[in-house]
Image (cartoon, helix red, strand yellow):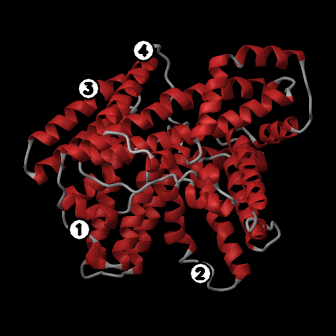
Amino acid sequence: MVFSSAIFLFAFLPLVYLLTHAVKSLRVRNLLLALASLVFYAFGQLQYLPLFLASVTVNYLAGRLLSGRMARSRAALAAAVALNLAVLIVFKYTDFMLQNLNAALGTGFPMTGIVLPIGISFFTFQGLSYVIDVYREPESGTRDYLKLLLYLSFFPQLIAGPIVKYHDISAQIDSRVLTPEESAAGIRRFIRGLAKKLLIADSVGYLADAAYATLSGTPDSRVMWLGAVCYTLQIYYDFSGYSDMAIGMGHMFGFTIRENFLFPYGASSLRDFWRRWHVSLSTWFREYLYIPLGGNRRGRARAALNRFAVFLCTGIWHGANWTFLFWGLAHGLLSSAEDWGLIPVKKLARSPWGRTLCRVYTLLCVTLLFAIFRADSLADGFRLIAALFSGSLTAEGSLLLARLLSPAALLWIALAALLAGNLVPKLRERVKLPEPLADALSLALLCLCILCLAKGGFHPFIYFQF
C-alpha cells in the first residue's frame, strides 16, 4: 500500500483517522495506530510481517537489557547492533555479494532471489538508534512494548522515513493533544506532498525514463541532459513529497516529525547540500558514525577519513549496486575537497557572483552524480556522463525531443525548477493567505491529484527500494 494509491487515500487513511479520533483513551489510540501500521505493512508484504515483528522484539529486549542490570553492557549492545545489521545485510546485499564473488573468482554460486522487505533500511536504522541511545542513557528506554512497536511501525514514516529517533517522539506517544487546527494543517501538508508526487515527480519522471531508455543505443547529448535534469527534479519531488505526506499525517495524529528537506537545490556547496538533503539520514550518520569515529576532533586528515567512511556507508545504505557506492564516495571526495580549500567555495561565497557560481557548481555536481545514481550500472553511468559532454546530435534524438517536450511537459519542468527553491516559503512568509483560501487551494490540488489517479498507471516511490 502506498500513499498515492486509491485504497490508501479513500479507505485506509480516512478509516484510521476517524477511529483514532473517535476514542479518548490515549493508550487505545496508540494501540489502534500500531495495529493499523501492521496492517499497512502486511498489505504490501504479508510474508515479511513476522520479520518486522521479530526486529521490534529484538530491539525491545535489547533495550530492556541495556536499561536494566546490564546497563551499558557493550556485549549486549554489540549483539543487538550485529543482529540488526545482519538482517539488513542478508536481505539487501546477499545477491550483490554473490554476484561480485562469482565475477571475481569465477565461481558459480546461484543467486538467492531474495525479495527486499519494504522499509527495511529505515526501520533497521530506527532500531539501531534506539538501542544505541539506551546504551548511552539507560533511562531513555521503555518497558512498554506497545510504545516501541508504535515508534518502529508508525505507518506514515515506516516505509521511507523520515528516520525518527525514539527520544524525539517518546513524549508525544505518552502525551499529545489532537486538535482540529493541527489536523487541518496536517491535511494541507499531506495534500502538498501528494501533489509533489503525482503532479510533478511523476510528470518529470516520465521524461527521465524516456531519456534513459535511449542509453542502450546511440545517445543524444540533448536527450541525456533532459534525462539527467528531469531525474534530479524527480527524485527531489518524489522523496520530499513522501516526507511532506509523512509529516502531514503525523500532525493529523498529533505527532510532530522533524523536517527532512530544507530546499537542498539552493545549497552553495556539497557540504551545505547534505545539511539540507535527507536531513534525518545525514543526522543519523553524524550522530551514530561520524562523531563516534572522532568527528573533526583529531585533525583535518582524520576528519576527512571519517567523512569518507560516512559517505561510503551512505552509498551502501542506498542499495546493492556499485552506482550507489560511487555516488557516496564521490560526494565524500568533493566534500573533503571543499573542506581542504581545494574547491574554494568559502572564498567564492563572500561575493554575490561567487555565491551564484557556488550554487551552479553544487547543482551541476548533484545532477551529474544523480545521473550515475539512476543508472543501472557504473558502465551505463559513465556512458551517460560521456554522452552529456559529447555534443552528439542524432536524428532519433531530435524526434524524441519533439515528442517529449510538449507545452505541458515544458510547463511541468519550469514549474518543478521554480518550486525547487525557497520561493514559495518566502511568499508564504510575506503573504498570509486566509485559512478558507488556503483550504480552497488545497482542495483544488487534491482534485487535480484525484484526476491524475483516475488516469491510471502506477509509479512507486523511488525510496521504497532502499
Vertical comparison of 207 with 297: above or below = above
Nearer to me, 408 or 16:
408
Q: Residue 91 at x, y = what percent?
A: 50, 47
Disc 4 residue crowd, few under 14, some 14–19, many 20+, Cα 10 Å: few
Q: Identify residue for label 2.
A: 294
Q: Which residue is mark 1?
A: 142
Question: Is residue 372 shown left or right of residue 188?
Answer: right
> Closer to the N terminus: mark 4 or mark 2?
2
Numbered disc in front, either 1 or 3: 3
Viewer-nearest residue: 46 or 218: 218
Count of picture labels: 4
Q: Which mark is residue 11?
A: 3
Front: mark 4 or 3: 4
Per the image, the residue denoted by label 4 is 454
Q: Is residue 217 above or below residue 294?
A: above
Q: Tell me which residue sits at (66%, 43%) in the image.
A: 109
Q: Is the residue 437 above or below the residue 277 in the image?
A: above
